[in-house]
Amino acid sequence: MRLRNIKGADEAIENSEYCIKNPESLKGNWQSVFPSSQPLHIEVGMGKGRFIMDLAAANPDINYIGIERYTSVLYRAVQKMELTPLPNLRFLCIDAATLPDVFAPEEVARIYLNFSDPWPKDRHAKRRLTSREFFARYNQILAKDGRVEFKTDNQDLFTFSLEEIPEAGWNLVASTRDLHHDPVLNEGNIMTEYEEKFSSKGNPICKLIANR
Ligand code: SAM
């Protein structure tokens, strides 16, 4: 994701009715920000929001929170929401390392990770969103029957993620290294911005689903 400072992004997010401020105060009470009480799914590292906006539009019976660390990126999603508001979607500008401060145990029913930053240096492995350290954070907020769904075109990151699942005490439910040619896992697939970009270059897309 290109990280240019975008003029006005911080202020727009501060003032946006779609971006949640003081998220720690909502811990255990996230349903109060939505018109209907229904399962809560989150995307961590949502970028400009294409995936979660399409998902929220297709599933009005689920509430969604899109999480993105940088205001300059989140700003693009906020602009799209202003044009096409979705009652079941809100945004959060935080570092995912703080997820357990923001969501109560079992408050989240599903976590999506799409094209997460690879952090290729070994010494940065803990920062990968599919590291055992991050699975421990997801463990603190995910419902017992909840799951994590992860997509990437980065083969090394995918191999790392497959290895981290048992190390974290989780189970691999399903996986493929060629999602777009997998009739079962590709059913109903919603493309992300990065997925569109990398698959159009010919990169196969990998996907895994993990639970406990
Ligand atoms: N998910 C989008 C897609 O598939 O098109 C964007 C992918 S982009 C490579 C990864 C995004 O995750 C970036 O916007 C980055 O800022 C965000 N991100 C990475 N680490 C994060 C973290 N710890 N907390 C929140 N967002 C994070």
Image: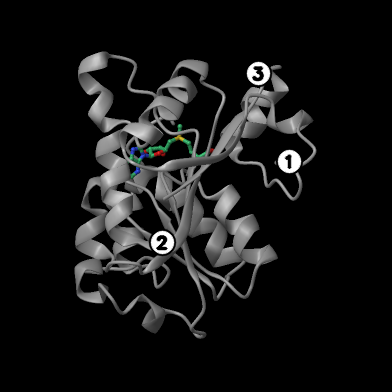
Mark 3 and mark 1 lie on one chain; the one further toward the N terminus is: 1
Mark 2 and mark 3 lie on one chain; the one further toward the N terminus is: 2
Q: Which residue is mark 3?
A: 203
Indicate whether 167 appears above or below 47: above
User: Judging from the image, what secondary structure is the residue with disc 1 in?
Assistant: loop
Residue at disc 1, CB closer than 8 Å to ligand 1: no
User: Residue 197: percent from the left, percent from the top?
Assistant: 64, 27
The answer to the question of whether label 3 and label 1 lie on touching residues, with beta carbons closer than 8 A, is no
Mark 1 and mark 2 lie on one chain; the one further toward the N terminus is: 2
User: Quadrant of the image for the N terminus?
Assistant: top left
Q: Is 54 left, or right, of 116 in this rendering?
A: right
Tag count in the figure?
Answer: 3
Q: From mark 1 to mark 2, how far is it between C-alphas?
A: 26 Å
Residue 115 visible in the shown view:
yes
Residue at disc 3, CB closer than 8 Å to ligand 1: no
Q: From mark 3 to mark 1, how far is it between C-alphas?
A: 15 Å
Q: How would you rate the neighbour count of disc 3 (Cα within 10 Å): few for under 14, some for 14-19, many for 20 or more? A: some
Q: Please name which of the two marks, 3 or 1, marks the residue nearer to the observer.
A: 1
The answer to the question of whether label 2 and label 3 lie on touching residues, with beta carbons closer than 8 A, is no
Amino acid, disc 1: Asn
Q: Please name which of the two marks, 1 or 2, marks the residue nearer to the observer.
A: 1
Residue 110 visible in the shown view:
no
User: Judging from the image, what secondary structure is the residue with disc 2 in?
Assistant: strand
User: Residue 125: percent from the left, percent from the top?
Assistant: 27, 24
Q: Residue at x 33, y 51 (%)?
A: 138
The picture quadrant where one finds residue 167 is top left
User: Residue 38: percent from the left, percent from the top?
Assistant: 52, 78
Q: Residue at x 69, y 17 (%)?
A: 201
Q: Which residue is mark 1?
A: 186
Amino acid, disc 3: Asn
Q: Regarding ligand 1, which quadrant of the image does it lie in?
A: top left
